[in-house]
Image: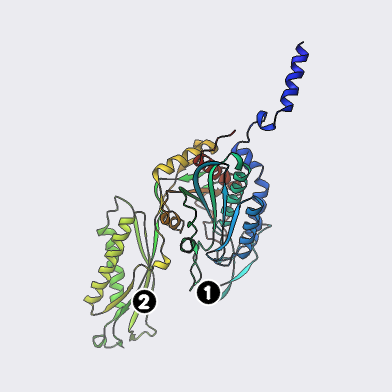
Amino acid sequence: MHRTLLGSALLLALSLPSSAWAAEPTTEALVEARLEHITALRRDIHQHPELSNRETRTAKLIAAELKKLGYDVQTGIAHTGVVGILKGGKPGPRLAIRADIDALPVTEEVDLPFASKVKGEYQGKTVGVMHACGHDVHTATTLGVASALASLRKDLPGEVMMIFQPAEEGAPAGEEGGAGLMVKEGVFKNFKPDAIFGMHVTSAYHVGVVALRPGGIMASSDTLRMVVHGRQTHGASPWRGIDPIVAGADIVMSAQSIVSRRMDINKDPVVLTFGIFDGGQRFNIVPDSARLEGTLRAFDTGMRDQALAELRQLAEHVAAAHGATVELQVPDESASNPVNFNDPAMTARVRASLEKVLGKDSVIEAERWTASEDFPQLGNSVPAPSVYFFVGGTPADKDTDQVAFNHSPRFFVDEGALKTATEGMLQASLDFLGYQAP
């Protein structure tokens, strides 16, 4: 009788659908099953980098991958952008996940079997092209997340939009591009996300580590341009003219008081830097004009606006004190990015997801980064709460203070970061959508 019952139970188990007795794959298992393909994609993209607004091969690869997975795919947004939408089998929220896909005008110096040998044209010159900021990692791991979500489609609540954005590093001169152009061309016209997630690999943290923080995680970036107009004269008789170099130098020096004396830096840091001062062509001639360019970085929108207003006022008054005038482009809106602000409540949810799949010790509080990027233009345009986190890429046996940083020709990513990034983003996505294994 015992053997009969055991045999009947075995026959019953075998007759059931596999989903009734096999454990639902974990996030780790879903990623592990795709890791070889994710790695191959990353190496292929790394070996064939393309500059901003020129990512035609990369876009074709992405579109082909998404179509194979059953996504509704749209191409040609903001020149070479690709969007894929997956509708789950159950009602639920809408999530957008963004990856940037462009490379940099940098000649690779890393000894890899898949190192880039590509050349491109940048500002009229032939240059090396390299994924020196990890966008190859972002693209490949986001495709891995897309694949895992597609495999769960039947039981997946809500909808997911995968955004593969070109020109994050900035469009070529005279062109539009990036997140701003995607918004302008209606990326969210028919899909209003309830949240937007993004990530960035960095050498600032070791592989296996993920870092995030609520509030401003990356600074706003404003390009400041001004021309100081004086009156030309011989350098031996400056009183016959108005010296725009002296006026410009006074503007540069006086502007430092905006940060040191007018901003409440107890609240958040602000950085004001002038990187270009161009005036005159001969040592003994006072020129008609001088050109100044710089950058303003801030982590608080109100402080950013205050600093810009203070700079406009200061430049005009200092120039007037010298008898000069100033032509201001402060800021140059075409070259500005807002504060990359992590919604605090959504950040807490994403942190819990990251800790669930990676472990609490692997999720740390990110340091604020005074670099900027255009990711927040997406969330601000909807508007929708957004979360952006960093993924460590430095090998465990290397000092993060000694390795090459992002944008370097020696920038190197330990491929262990592929697993970490994919698992983290996948878990955060599943938890936000409310996925429950059947």
User: Which of 59/382 is in front?
Assistant: 382
Q: In this view, does 423 lie above or below 77?
A: above
Q: How far apart are marks 2 and 1 (CA)?
A: 20 Å
Q: Residues within 10 Å of mark 1 (few under 14, many from 20)?
A: few
- Pick out the residue farthest to the left: 321
Residue 172, x across and y down, in percent: 51, 70
- Residue 59 spot, x, y in % from top left: 61, 61
Provide residue 344's location: percent of width, then percent of height. Answer: 39, 44
Its colouring scheme is rainbow
- The residue carrying mark 2 is 291
Q: Which of marks 2 and 1 is in front?
A: 1
Position of 312 with respect to 63 (left or right) is left
Nearer the observer, 425 or 420: 425
Q: Residue at (57%, 41%) from the top-left corner?
A: 156
Image point (45%, 59%), residue name: 374
Quadrant assignment for the N terminus: top right
Specify whether 174 is left or right of 108: left
Say whether residue 115 is left or right of residue 421. Answer: right
Residue 129 located left or right of residue 178: right
Say if mark 2 contacts mark 1, CB within 8 Å. no
Compared with 169, 99 (above or below) is: above
Mark closer to the chain start, 2 or 1: 1
- Residue 103 visible: no
Rendered view: 253 above or below 13: below
Identify the residue position indicated by label 1 in the image: 123
Q: Residue 278, which numbered label? A: none
Amino acid at pointer 2: Arg
The front one of 15 and 367 is 15
Name the residue located 36 percent from the left edge and 67 percent from the top edge.
331
Residue type for callout 1:
Gln
SS for callout 2: strand
Quadrant location, the C terminus: top right
